[in-house]
Amino acid sequence: MRTKYIVQQQIENLKSKNIQFNIVDEEYATQYLNDNTYYFKLKSFAKAFEYNETKKQYINLDFAYLVELSKLDMYLREYIIKLSLDTEHFLKVKFLHDLTNNGLEDGYNIVDLFFIKYPYISQNISLKKKDSACADLIHKYENNWAAWNIIEVLSFGDFVKLFQLYYDLYSDTKSKTIINLLWPLKFIRNASAHNNCLLNTLRKPYLHTHLFNNKKNTIEPNKELVSLLTKVPNISKNTRKKKIANPIIYDFIASLFLFNEVCSS
């Protein structure tokens, strides 16, 4: 069990790890840890910097670098959330456009199939009746859901399941590309929405990811994304392979390609 540190002890612990206070002084660091962030979150960004395992110390790391990286991380998360909201909107536009023009679908059949495949989602929707922004919508349409109103009460992850189910039944060329890029957006969107740090994994990527192949014991990129990246000029195969082996970089790049695929304005 680790000892709880007051801010001054946190500063001393950083110094013991050879984290310097040359660009900003200890007084600034104390104020920053008191008013702007908390130690555990800020310290996590140190993983992005070089570390001497023998001495148990960081190399050429200043407290200011941690502050700057944490700010960049915040801006990145804000951008990803905006990107994901716009992408979600245009995914729904495509879904409803295709369904509306599909003579084989009445908008209710697909929802029935959806609930058969994922019965827990119907239960989750019912739980929102008492306390959510879409409670009135649920009371009005419960037990009579159509595709065009149910998408307003689904989480993004559940909408992805509905989207995938529809295009499994009524496939088109564009949907195949989109579906292969959906899950990376879901993961990085959720991480951003929950204020999880992203840039602290640039040097040491996390392993517990949707990309991890247990049989091969390695991170295995989606073939669709690899195919799209091969069309980008001036990126060598080795560079491409190295960069997308990092789940955060992979998910972000996939999200950009997805945005470009579905957003029309």
Image: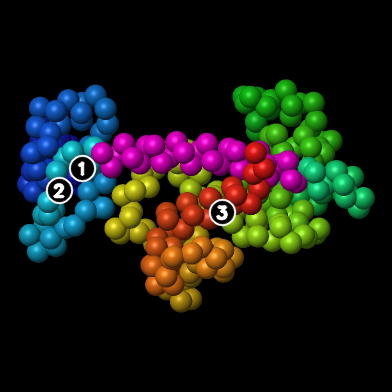
Q: CA distance from mark 2 to mark 1?
A: 7 Å
Q: CA distance from mark 3 to mark 1?
A: 30 Å
Task: Please rate how many residues cluster around mark 3, counting C-alpha atoms within 10 Å: few if below 14, some from 14 to 19, many from 20.
Answer: some
Q: Is residue 63 above or below residue 215?
A: above
Give the residue furthest to the front: 234
Say which quadrant the C terminus sits in.
top right
Q: Amino acid at mark 1?
A: Tyr
Find disc 2 in the rendering and name its residue: 61
State whether residue 212 appears in this view.
no
Residue 76 on the magenta segment: yes
As rendered, which of 136 and 194 lies closer to the eye?
194
Spot occupied by residue 34 in the image (x, y as percentages of width and height): 21, 26
Task: Tell me what residue is drawn at x 31 percent, y 36 percent.
Answer: 71
Task: Tell me what residue is drawn at x 30 percent, y 59 percent.
Answer: 204
Find disc 1 in the rendering and name its residue: 65
Task: Please rate how many residues cluster around mark 1, counting C-alpha atoms within 10 Å: few if below 14, some from 14 to 19, many from 20.
Answer: some
As rendered, which of 73 and 151 lies closer to the eye?
73
Give the residue furthest to the right: 103
Q: Is residue 181 above or below residue 19?
A: below
Number of numbered discs: 3
Is residue 254 found left or right of 205 in the rendered image?
Answer: right
Q: Amino acid at mark 2?
A: Leu
Whether tag 2 and tag 1 are in contact, CB under 8 A, the answer is yes
Find disc 3 in the rendering and name its residue: 257
Q: CA distance from mark 2 to mark 3?
A: 34 Å
Spot occupied by residue 69 in the image (x, y as percentages of width and height): 28, 42
Give the residue furthest to the bottom: 216
Q: Which residues are magenta?
A: 68-95
Task: Please rate how many residues cluster around mark 2, counting C-alpha atoms within 10 Å: few if below 14, some from 14 to 19, many from 20.
Answer: some
